[in-house]
Image (cartoon, helix red, strand yellow):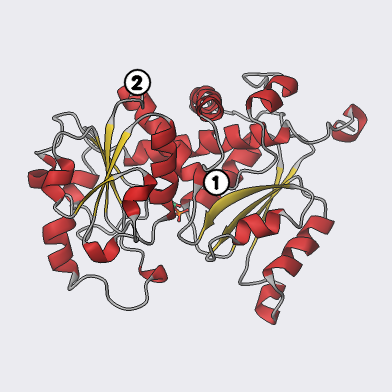
């Protein structure tokens, strides 16, 4: 099947990076380019039997040191739909369990000559460090509380599809801002694209000097939600917490869980989003999460595959081309 094409030269001119380590450093035109390319893949993915040959002869390795359902699976699907060979490394069954370090693991995989490594790690900055040591492209699948760039891109595409634009919208991000790489990547992307960003959380779940990120800060959820166009809910990321940050889960839901009563103060057509995984009854009411008229959660997952296809395509444009006889024996 023929891909919805841009030439490699155009792609490398329009997305000027060999790695995708974060939203930081991207320009608005590069983000728009990825969203536009992903949009064409959304349509393509809805057709049966979509397997393109754009990445035929290329190898993608997924290297996830933290658990994942959406990101890992959608990168696997994205790679396969573009014709790449995809390998998932299981940390549990690897030599990491024998004490091999992240860098030694990365160098070992690099020696097998993959074209792209998708890496998730619990330490902020680990993926960028790894990218300095390898010769292939690296995509950050989430590093600590730092960045999760493909999540922010798929969120942006979801918003653009539902609202027709990003610029000028009021986006309220609620929940555990402190420990959230999703929040950090989204705040940067939304600011680059001209949205107005608010964050809502108890003081214990806000990072120091959070307003320096370019957001309005609220502790009262109803004030933070008033008139907003988009509500992004975040879960409590207990895997990154030392100690207790909220008095109890039921009290947290009372003050910071999204339900219909609180959503009523937002714009009448405000869209509800969540990157997943959700903790129903903690940060979001289950009835609202499943309301297909208000919730875009399933669409976020769907367009996540298309965004990852667009990112792989953009990075591959920077790799040396494969000789026809090598790729098509
Ligand atoms: N949103 C997200 O990153 O989900 P996973 O942890 O399932 O990949």
Bin the neighbour count of mark 1 within 10 Å (Cα to Cα): few under 14, some 14-19, many 20 and up: many
Q: Are marks 2 and 1 in contact (CB under 8 Å)?
A: no
> Does ligand 1 reach within 8 Å of label 1's beta carbon?
no
User: Quick one: quadrant of the N terminus?
Assistant: top right
Q: Where is residue 96 in the image (x, y as percent from the top left)?
A: 67, 74
Choose mark 2 or mark 1, whichever is in front.
1
Question: Extreme right residue here?
Answer: 325
Asked whether residue 63 is in view, the answer is no
Determine whether, in the image, residue 106 is placed left or right of residue 63.
Answer: right
Tag 1 residue: 22
> Could you say whether the residue bearing mark 1 is in a helix, strand or loop?
loop
Of the two numbered discs 2 and 1 on the same chain, state the one appearing first in sequence: 1
User: Quick one: quadrant of the C terminus?
Assistant: top right
Bin the neighbour count of mark 2 within 10 Å (Cα to Cα): few under 14, some 14-19, many 20 and up: few
Please tell me which residue lies in front, 267 or 303.
267
> Does ligand 1 reach within 8 Å of label 2's beta carbon?
no
Q: Residue at position x 73%, y 62% from top? A: 106
> Could you say whether the residue bearing mark 2 is in a helix, strand or loop?
loop
Tag 2 residue: 164
């Amino acid at each position: 099947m023929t891909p919805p094409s841009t030439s490699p030269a155009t792609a490398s001119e329009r997305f000027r990076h060999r790695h995708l380590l974060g939203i930081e450093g991207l320009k608005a035109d590069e983000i728009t380019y990825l969203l536009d390319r992903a949009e064409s893949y959304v349509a393509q993915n809805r057709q049966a039997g979509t397997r393109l040959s754009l990445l035929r002869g290329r190898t993608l390795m997924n290297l996830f040191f933290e658990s994942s359902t959406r990101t890992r699976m959608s990168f696997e699907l994205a790679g396969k739909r573009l014709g790449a060979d995809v390998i998932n490394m299981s940390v549990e069954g690897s030599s990491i369990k024998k004490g091999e370090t992240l860098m030694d693991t990365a160098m070992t995989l690099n020696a097998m000559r993959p074209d792209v490594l998708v890496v998730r790690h619990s330490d902020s900055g680990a993926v960028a460090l790894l990218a300095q040591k390898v010769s292939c492209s690296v995509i950050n699948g989430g590093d600590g509380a730092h960045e999760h760039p493909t999540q922010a891109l798929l969120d942006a595409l979801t918003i653009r599809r539902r609202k027709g634009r990003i610029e000028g919208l009021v986006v309220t991000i609620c929940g555990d801002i402190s420990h959230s790489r999703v929040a950090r990547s989204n705040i940067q992307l939304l600011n680059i694209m001209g949205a107005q960003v608010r964050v809502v959380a108890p003081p214990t779940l806000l990072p120091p000097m959070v307003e320096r990120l370019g957001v309005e800060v609220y502790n009262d959820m109803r004030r933070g939600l008033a008139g907003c166009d988009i509500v992004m809910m975040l879960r409590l990321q207990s895997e990154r917490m030392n100690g207790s940050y909220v008095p109890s889960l039921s009290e947290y839901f009372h003050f910071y869980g999204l339900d219909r009563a609180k959503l009523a103060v937002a714009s009448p057509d405000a869209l509800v989003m969540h990157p997943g995984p959700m903790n129903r009854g903690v940060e979001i009411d289950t009835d609202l999460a499943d309301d297909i008229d208000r919730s875009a959660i399933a669409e976020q997952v769907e367009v996540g595959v298309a965004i990852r296809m667009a990112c792989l395509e953009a990075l591959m444009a920077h790799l040396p081309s494969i000789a026809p006889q090598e790729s098509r024996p």
